[in-house]
């Protein structure tokens, strides 16, 4: 995921965006037509995290580190040499 201030986002989809409070500290944004998970927003913060796979190419994005590696399944191998974090810092 990548993030941006909500004022910098322009949604151009014809389908409605549906927000769901998934916990006391977060909301998730879904496509109102197909239910795809598109966004994540932490309560009280302006930044909206965007599922990078939903962006058109070229994105200009690059992986800089891995988070939640303590929770990854045993079939994942992370061997790209980038920093790994057990949880969100």
Image (spheres, rainbow, N blue to C red):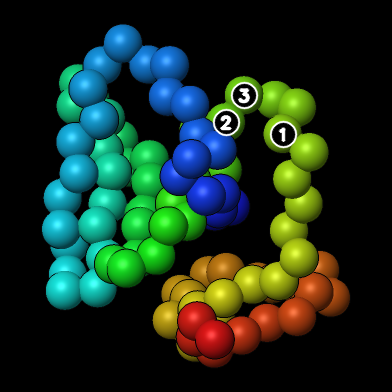
Q: Position of residue 67 (x, y in %)?
A: 57, 76
Residue 74: tell me if it is visible.
no
Q: Residue at x 22, y 22 (%)?
A: 16
49 vs 25, left or right, is right
Please tell me in which quadrant of the rendered image residue 40 appears: bottom left
Residues marked 2 and 3 touching at CB (< 8 Å): yes
In the depicted view, which residue is nearer to us: 84 or 50? Answer: 50
Question: Callout 3: 10 Å neighbours few (<14), some, many (20+)?
Answer: few
Please tell me in which quadrant of the rendered image residue 27 appears: bottom left
Q: Is residue 43 above or below residue 89?
A: above
In the picture, the disc for residue 24 is none
In the picture of the structure, the residue carrying the numbered disc 2 is 55
Label 3 and label 1: CA atoms lie apart by 6 Å
Label 2 and label 1: CA atoms lie apart by 7 Å
9 vs 66, left or right, is left
Q: Position of residue 1 (x, y in %)?
A: 54, 53
Q: Position of residue 42 (x, y in %)?
A: 35, 65
Image quadrant where one finds the C terminus:
bottom right
Q: Secondary structure at mark 3?
A: loop
In the picture of the structure, the residue carrying the numbered disc 1 is 59
Q: Position of residue 54 (x, y in %)?
A: 50, 33
Q: Secondary structure at mark 2?
A: loop
Question: Callout 1: 10 Å neighbours few (<14), some, many (20+)?
Answer: few
Residues marked 2 and 1 touching at CB (< 8 Å): yes
Question: Callout 2: 10 Å neighbours few (<14), some, many (20+)?
Answer: few
In the picture, the disc for residue 56 is 3
Q: Residue at x 26, y 38 (%)?
A: 30
In the depicted view, which residue is nearer to us: 4 or 74? Answer: 4
Q: Is residue 25 above or below residue 11?
A: below
Report the residue that reaches farthest toward the right. 81
Residues marked 3 and 1 touching at CB (< 8 Å): yes
Q: Residue at x 80, y 74 (%)?
A: 82
């Amino acid at each position: 995921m990548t993030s941006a201030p909500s004022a910098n986002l322009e949604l151009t989809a014809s389908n409605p965006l549906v927000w769901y409070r998934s916990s006391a500290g977060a909301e998730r944004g879904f496509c109102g037509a197909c239910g795809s998970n598109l966004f994540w927003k932490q309560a009280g913060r302006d930044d909206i995290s965007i599922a990078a796979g939903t962006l058109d190419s070229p994105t200009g994005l690059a992986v800089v580190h891995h988070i939640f590696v303590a929770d990854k399944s045993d079939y994942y191998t992370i061997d790209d040499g980038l920093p790994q974090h057990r949880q969100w810092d």
